[in-house]
Amino acid sequence: MSELRGIYTLWLREVKKFLREKPRLLNAFCQPLLWLFIFGTGMRFSAGIPGVNYLEFIFPGLVCQAMLFTAMFMGVSVIWDREFGFLKEILVSPISRPSIFLGKMLGISTDVMIQGIIIFPFAFLIGAHVDIFIFIQALPIMILISTGLVCIGLTFASLVKNFEGFGLIQTFVNLPMFFLSGALFPLANVPQWLRWVSFANPLTYGVDALRTVMMGDTWVQMFPMYVSIAVLVVFDVFIFSVGTYAFSRTE
């Protein structure tokens, strides 16, 4: 029971921190609007996809982008906790380090899910068809995506000792994962070597699965749904194991 109570407390702390930061919630609304109506509108006329509403095409990718950037950014909480001594207090408490990692992962994953869900109402502004049934189908995929992304951020934050180093790693990871996921353009149009690189990106499978759910027959999926789900599950288990090991060696 003490382990469960510790996990719950850490989860609640991360969620409260997120909800109390009003500028971050405001950014959750403003950033998708900028991408949709400035970048999306410009690209629709210069690099549109025949027979497909480009704004509707990039919408699932922007949901994943918001989740990716939030997950990686909030991984820095480990460094903040270390800097201000809170991490030391947690590590000496009667709760195992895997449970500490799990509690922080669940808390940040909840924040990431909130960030992604906030974007869904914008679908109606671009004429995308998103009803309650599509939303319910999208939620499990978003949970798998957020879990893996949060574990990546926490893993790097556990290994890096300062904010500057984490910032460099964050940029190095965020941009390639986002641009190589097919969020902004179909991967069928890229060179073969770049397509193979994209296949090694777990976010590619998340974007494709989410786009398949949200666009339905309008979108010809790259991978069967079961393949995308299987890849996300395997990746989540793998990176959670790596992250737990990295956190357990935190000093």
Image (cartoon, rainbow, N blue to C red):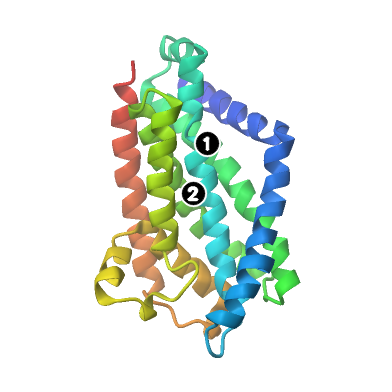
| Dot 1 crowding, Cα within 10 Å, few <14, some 14–19, many 20+ | many
Label 2 vs label 1: CA separation?
A: 12 Å
Question: In front here: 181 or 225?
Answer: 181
On screen, 46 above or below 16?
Answer: below
Mark 2 or mark 1: name the one nearer the start of the chain.
1
* Residue visible at 51% across and 39% down in the picture: 73
Residue 121 x/y as whole percent:
72, 62
Query: Nearest the camera: 64 or 113?
Result: 64
Residue under circle 1? 74
Q: Is residue 184 above or below residue 251?
A: below
| Residue occupying the point 37% across, 80% down | 188
The picture quadrant where one finds residue 59 is bottom right
Q: Quadrant of residue 54?
A: bottom right
Give the SS element for disc 2: helix
Looking at the image, residue 181 sits to the left or right of residue 17; the answer is left
- Dot label at residue 146: 2
Q: Is residue 138 above or below residue 105?
A: below
User: Number of numbered discs present?
Assistant: 2
Task: Give above or below for 249 relative to 122.
Answer: above
The amino acid type of the residue labelled 2 equals: Ser
Specify the quadrant of the image occupied by residue 245. top left
Q: Name which residue lies at 37% across and 69% down.
A: 226
Q: SS at mark 1?
A: helix
Residue sitting at 67 percent across and 75 percent down? 128
Q: Taking 120 as reference, is 147 left or right? A: left
Q: Position of residue 179 (x, y in %)?
A: 43, 62
